[in-house]
Structures are given as structure tokens and as C-alpha cells.
């Protein structure tokens, strides 16, 4: 019941209240990986990144096959500027769940920031292969293509992202494709 109430509080962005409920759930059942995972998410939203990582670590220790815990720990590591750790966590999430399109997207974003453009293209393309309606993956891949002097490919990706509902893509088209 505490976990469910925490989820409800999280949905209205009452992260402090959600954390209190997850605390109670963990007190009752210290082996509740889901409660640790959800508390980690709430702590991340409150910018308690170290606390979030500890909760994700606990969730992973209890359930080492939780790809989402690895991916969210990766996001949190990125917030702490531990970019290599971030990429390693996305890779772990992908190894657990090779169909985890968001993990490919997140890893592609970080590779892009490292100027690993070919690696970023591969990750964005894999995210699109898994989810052909993943507008953000098309948009990200479009930027990489632009940097690789494939303007036509970039414009096609942004056009697809726009068709899929990512309206910012039309601004990119106006700026770079005309």
C-alpha cells in the first residue's frame, strides 16, 4: 500500500511525500527492490543524486536483472557528471533487455556529447529499429547526421520526428534544411 501511495504522490510531483511512503515500505520489507527503485527515482527528481544512486544500487543488488534500475542509475550518474559510469549503466541495461529503446537513446545522447558520432548513430538507429515511432531518436540522429555533413539525411530524420509529433523538429528543418 505504501508503494502504491508513493506512486500516486509521485504522479502529482510530491516527491518528498513519495519518499516518505517508500521509506515505510522499505522498513516493512527491506528486500523490496521496487520500493528502492521508486525511491531512487523520487530522490533523483529532488536532486538527491547520491541518495538516488544508493537506492538504485540496493534495487540492483536485490534484483540484478532490473534493466530500468540500471538505466535510471545511468541518468543519475550523468547528473553527477560520471559520464563513463552513465554509459556503462546504459550498456548493462541493454545487455539485460536488448529491446530497451530508451537505453539506446540515452547512450546515443551521451556518445554524441563525447563526439563519438558513429557510436551515437548506431545507438539512435537501434532505438529506431526497436521502436520505429521514436521521434526523439530520429531527432538525435538528425543532429549527428548534420555534423557528419549528411544534411539530406538529417532533414529526413527531422521530418520523420516532426511527423511523429516532435514539433521542435520543424524548427530544426527551418534552421538547417532550407
Image: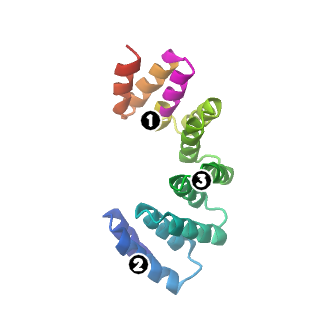
Residue shown at the point (45%, 67%) measured from the top left: 43
Region in magenta: 140-152
Task: Kindly identify the residue that appears in the image at 37 percent across and 68 percent down.
Answer: 15
Q: Which element is circle 1 on? A: helix
Percent x, y of residue 148:
57, 21
Q: Are marks 3 and 1 in contact (CB under 8 Å)?
A: no
> Considering only order in the chain, which callout, 1 or 3, is on the residue closer to the N terminus?
3
Gap in angstroms between the C-alphas marked 1 and 2 = 35 Å
**Crowdedness of circle 1 by 10 Å Cα count: few (<14), some, many (20+)?**
many
Quadrant placement of the C terminus: top left
Tag in front: 3 or 1:
3
Q: Earlier in the sequence, mark 1 or mark 2?
A: 2
Position of residue 3 relative to residue 138, above or below, is: below
Mark carried by residue 14: none
Residue positioned 37% across, 66% down in the render: 10
Q: Which residue is mark 2?
A: 21
Which quadrant holds residue 20? bottom left
Q: Are marks 1 and 2 in contact (CB under 8 Å)?
A: no
> Of all residues shown, which one is farthest toward the bottom?
28
Residue ID for mark 1: 135
Give the left or right position of residue 171, taking residue 111 as reference: left
Classify residue 177 by image quadrant: top left
**In the picture shown, does residue 84 fall above or below 124?**
below
Residue hosting label 3: 82
Relative horizontal placement of residue 123, taking residue 9 as reference (left or right): right
Q: Colour scheme used in the picture?
A: rainbow
Nearer to us in this view, 53 or 164: 53
Amino acid at each position: 500500500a505504501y508503494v502504491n501511495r508513493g506512486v500516486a504522490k509521485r504522479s502529482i510531483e510530491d516527491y518528498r511525500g513519495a519518499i516518505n511512503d517508500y521509506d515505510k515500505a522499505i522498513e516493512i520489507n527491506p528486500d523490496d527492490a521496487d520500493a528502492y527503485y521508486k525511491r531512487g527515482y523520487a530522490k533523483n527528481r529532488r536532486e538527491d543524486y547520491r541518495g538516488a544512486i544508493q537506492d538504485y544500487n540496493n534495487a540492483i543488488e536485490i534484483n540484478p536483472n532490473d534493466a530500468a534500475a540500471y538505466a535510471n542509475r545511468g541518468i543519475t550518474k550523468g547528473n553527477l557528471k560520471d559520464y563513463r559510469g552513465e554509459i556503462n549503466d546504459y550498456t548493462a541495461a541493454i545487455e539485460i533487455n536488448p529491446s530497451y529503446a530508451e537505453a539506446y537513446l540515452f547512450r546515443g545522447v551521451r556518445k554524441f556529447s563525447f563526439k563519438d558520432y558513429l557510436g551515437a548513430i548506431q545507438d539512435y538507429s537501434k532505438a529506431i529499429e526497436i521502436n520505429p515511432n521514436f521521434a526523439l531518436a530520429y531527432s538525435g540522429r538528425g543532429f549527428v547526421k548534420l555534423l557528419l555533413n549528411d544534411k539530406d539525411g538529417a532533414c529526413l530524420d527531422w521530418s520523420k520526428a516532426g511527423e511523429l509529433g516532435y514539433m521542435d523538429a520543424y524548427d530544426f528543418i527551418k534552421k538547417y534544411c532550407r
